[in-house]
Amino acid sequence: MPIKTLYDNESGLVQTTCSGKISYTDLSNYQKSVWLEPDVTGFNEIIDFSEADLSEISFSDLISLAENTPKVFALSLHSKLALITKTDHQKQLIEFYISVNTLAETPARSIKNFDSLNNALSWLSEN
């Protein structure tokens, strides 16, 4: 599977790396499997897309993922989601996803896009 997830109970972090071609189904399955996990409630999350091919992901896919967030979300609204991108295409898609979440009727946790793991970790460590 092109999505690998590590759970760090000590630091309260879900860290996910995506590589290769990622489909809507991959992201939807990830969302359902990780975001429904009661053991990670309150955890911050990093999803690293820097090595992922997101060419199969459409804007309508991202709207669907954002609309499903309240249905599958077990993580706390006080947690943060850091997304890491490298290419302009990845950044464009992620910024769109962030915008859709910001406009959602249901409150969303803080979400930001970063260009490196260090910058993402720094933001997650802020109160």
Image: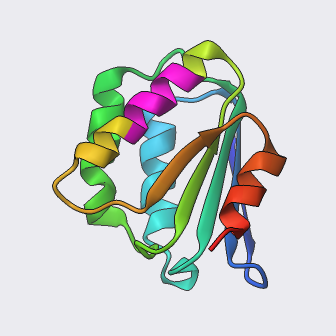
Region in magenta: 91-98
Q: Is residue 6 magenta?
A: no
Residue 90: image location, x then y, percent = 58, 23
Q: Is residue 99 above or below residue 54?
A: below
Q: Is residue 1 visible?
A: no
Instruction: Report the front residue among 37 and 125.
Output: 125
Give the residue displayed 48% in from the left and 82% down from the top: 38
Q: Main secondary structure of the magenta part?
A: helix
Q: Quadrant location of the C terminus? A: bottom right
Residue furthest front as drawn: 127
Instruction: Report the front residue among 60 and 116.
Output: 116
Q: Is residue 94 visible?
A: yes
Residue 30: image location, x then y, percent = 51, 52
Q: Quadrant location of the N terminus? A: top right
Give the residue displayed 47% in from the left and 25% down from the top: 93
The quarter of the picture where residue 46 lies is: bottom right
Q: Is residue 28 above or below residue 51?
A: below
